[in-house]
Amino acid sequence: MGLAELPLELVIAIAKASRNAHDINTLARTCRRFYQGLNTFLYQYSIRYSGGSGMYRASDTGNAAAVGKFLDHGADPNAASSGPPLILAATRGHYNVAELLIKRCPDLNINIRDPGSHYSAFFWAIVKGNEELAALLLNAGADINLGDDEGNTPFSESIEEGSTKKVKWLLDHGAKFETDVPHGDTALTIAAEHGNEEIVRLLLEKDIDLDHMNEENRTALSLAVENGYLGIAKLLIHKGASIDIVNEDGMTPLGGATEYGHVDIMELLIDNGADIDFLDSNGSCCLAIAMEENQMSAFELLLKKGANIDLQDDTGSTPLHVAAGLRNTEFAKLLLEHGANIEAKDSAGDTPLSSATRKGFLESATLLLDRGANIETRNDSEHTPLFTAATFGHMDLINRLIARGASVNVSDEFGRTPLLVAIASKNDKLRAVLIENGAIHDHDANDAIDTESTTNAG
């Protein structure tokens, strides 16, 4: 008797005893009679022993007929060991498989999520841009707002992608646009940050919170401004977004635009009433921010628009104090040309010249001296610019100040002179320059220093 002539009952018994899928499939392909006799057994075997791999392959390849046979033989439509069939259908765009599952399976979990990405079938349909499949799933009860474990939703992903078409479709089908996503963002803050102007327009047609802050206390306007999106900034301002709202850095949108040098946006903000003299949480005004970030065009615009050139921060420093402490003297020149107070004092009594000498910036100090700064001005500790330069050992500045007539014999509130500072710091070069230029050698003070040194050594 040949193999093909074996009784079907015996063939099935052999298949049951085999427990090897490859061998069983080989046996089934021997002849049509074996295939027909083993067909039911093969489906049951796959369901029972292969972890649903057959159902997986059928769903993955869009073989709706095979999927239907697996269901006929008791396959679980929600089995996730090899990947839920509905997820596979959605990721591959197999409308026919998804439709079959929905029609045939009353217990189908329409919101089942991908074990890997944690996307639902509807989420995958949106990601793939398959509106027909998305509509099918939605009509079957899919949650349009169901996101992944990180809170990303089909709507937020579509916005980040910049797909106006997807966003409009989702809005038209009832997607929530105020739902928070990772980092406390909303649809509007994401769209503004990514420069999606058309999406912003769509969102602004809704009753949306214009001033929602994300985890960094940035609103849609703040994000648009910092990233240089003039068109979006115009839309938000026209719609009524708060123009002086403060972010986590204590900075307004104008401060942000200044920091990044977005002059066109700065002008838009100022022309719409932004506070040009607002001080951020660091006490910096926009003029100071422009200087610290070396944004000359932004600085010039602020001057043109009437920023207060003598505005004092929490430490009493003016913009000229800030400029004097920079290597770039162009900012200080502009401030002086616009009438900045060259003798303004901060809370410690320091003038811009004092700031320049403390930092050791010869060019800034020279500019201020050329413009008439008081070379003998004293701060609250009775330090003159020369005394300050001596304290920090800035020899080039010391020589310049002496050449300009600075007194070498001034004393501070404790009676210390620049020479005493030189002796205490063991700066022989400074000591020699001061003595050469008339510094009085105070032996009592010198003895006091020697005594202090001996005491400390002991």
Image (cartoon, rainbow, N blue to C red):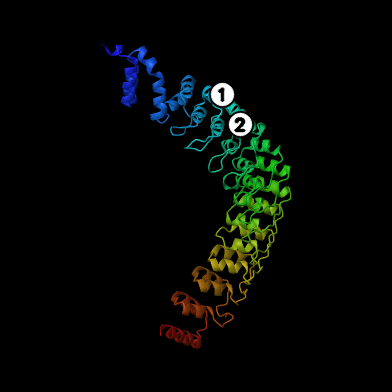
**Vertical side of 287 occupied by 101: above or below:** above
Residue 235 position in % (x across, y down): 69, 40
Q: Who comes first in sequence, dot 1 or dot 2?
A: 1
Q: Nearer the viewer, residue 229 or 396?
A: 229
Residue 152 position in % (x across, y down): 56, 41
**Left or right, 205 with reference to 391:** right
Element marked by disc 1: helix
The residue carrying mark 2 is 141
Q: Nearer the viewer, residue 316 or 10?
A: 10
Residue 426 position in % (x across, y down): 44, 77
The residue carrying mark 1 is 103
**Left or right, 92 with reference to 131:** left
**Vertical side of 21 occupied by 283: above or below:** below
Q: Nearer the viewer, residue 138 or 251?
A: 138
Q: Given the image, on which type of amino acid does mark 1 rest? A: Lys
> Foreground mark, 1 or 2?
1
* Distance CA(mark 1)–CA(mark 2): 13 Å
Residue 276 position in % (x across, y down): 70, 54
The image shows a total of numbered marks equal to 2
Q: How many C-alpha atoms fall within 10 Å of the one at disc 1: few (<14), some, or many (≥20)?
A: few
Q: Given the image, on which type of amino acid does mark 2 rest? A: Gly
